[in-house]
Amino acid sequence: MMMKTVRLLLAPALLAVSFASTAAEFKLGYINTERVYREATPAVLVMKKLEKEFSDRRAELKKMEARAKELETILGKSSLNIADRKQYERELAALDRDYRAKGRELAEDFNLRRNEEFAAVQERANRTIKQIAEREQFDLILQDAVYINPKYDITVKVLKELEK
């Protein structure tokens, strides 16, 4: 009976020691993907490329905004005759419809292109993360956690690798 009691008490102690030694060897890392997509050189280059690609369309929308403000100023004057007022109101309504349609189209096209371009950045970042994990013998690397202790954050390492 005494032997069974010793075994029952010894088993949890051995299990705790085994777990502690395993936990000490476990290497954990964390990547802040939002920061990688915001700060990594490839991501910055993608955003610059997209800004350039869509700059003409954005400039066109700005011109439309300026014309709409001009029309609103004209319509704010009480000295307009009825025919001119109706003409400016029609022009403003048409401009508003056109502006909204082009704005939606621009947003959709921009998001589509951004997703296409960032897929390549994401693929490269994932390859880099795997290389770091293998080289530095990480057991687990997490992305997008609710909370992580900063000592596990290896985002800076990933950013440096992506600079190369």
Image (tube, rainbow, N blue to C red):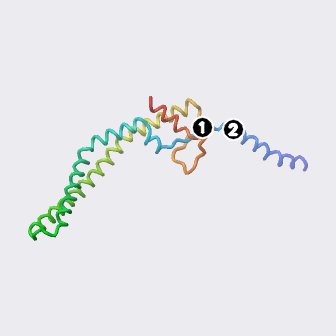
Residue that badge 2 annotates: 24
In the rendered image, residue 73, in percent from the top left (x then y), is placed at 20, 62
Please rate how many residues cluster around mark 2, counting C-alpha atoms within 10 Å: few if below 14, some from 14 to 19, many from 20: few
Under circle 2, the secondary element is: helix
Amino acid under disc 1: Asp
Residue 78, compared with residue 39, is above or below; it is below
Q: Residue 109 carries which label?
A: none
Foreground residue, 89 or 28?
Answer: 89
Asked if the residue at tag 1 contacts the one at tag 2, i.e. Cβ–Cβ closer than 8 Å, the answer is: no
**Residue 13, how many percent across, how many down?**
79, 45
* Quadrant in the picture for the C terminus: top left
Q: How crowded is mark 1: few (under 14 residues within 10 Å), some or many (20 or more)?
A: few
Q: In which quarter of the image is residue 40?
A: top left
* 77 with respect to 48 (left or right): left
Give me the residue at 55% from left, 38% from top: 154
Q: How many marks?
A: 2
Q: Which amino acid does label 2 sit on?
A: Ala
Q: Which residue is tagged 1?
A: 139
Left or right of residue 128: residue 59 = left
Q: Left or right of 159: which side holds 46?
A: left
Query: How far is the residue under mark 2 from the one under mark 1?
Result: 12 Å
Residue 9: percent from left, percent from top: 83, 48
Secondary structure under badge 1? loop
The residue depicted at 68 percent of the width and 40 percent of the height is 23
Residue 110 spot, x, y in % from top left? 31, 47
Name which quarter of the figure residue 22 lies in.
top right
Mark before the other along the chain sequence, 2 or 1: 2
Residue 13 located left or right of residue 99: right
At a point 10% along the width and 66% down the height, the residue shown is 84
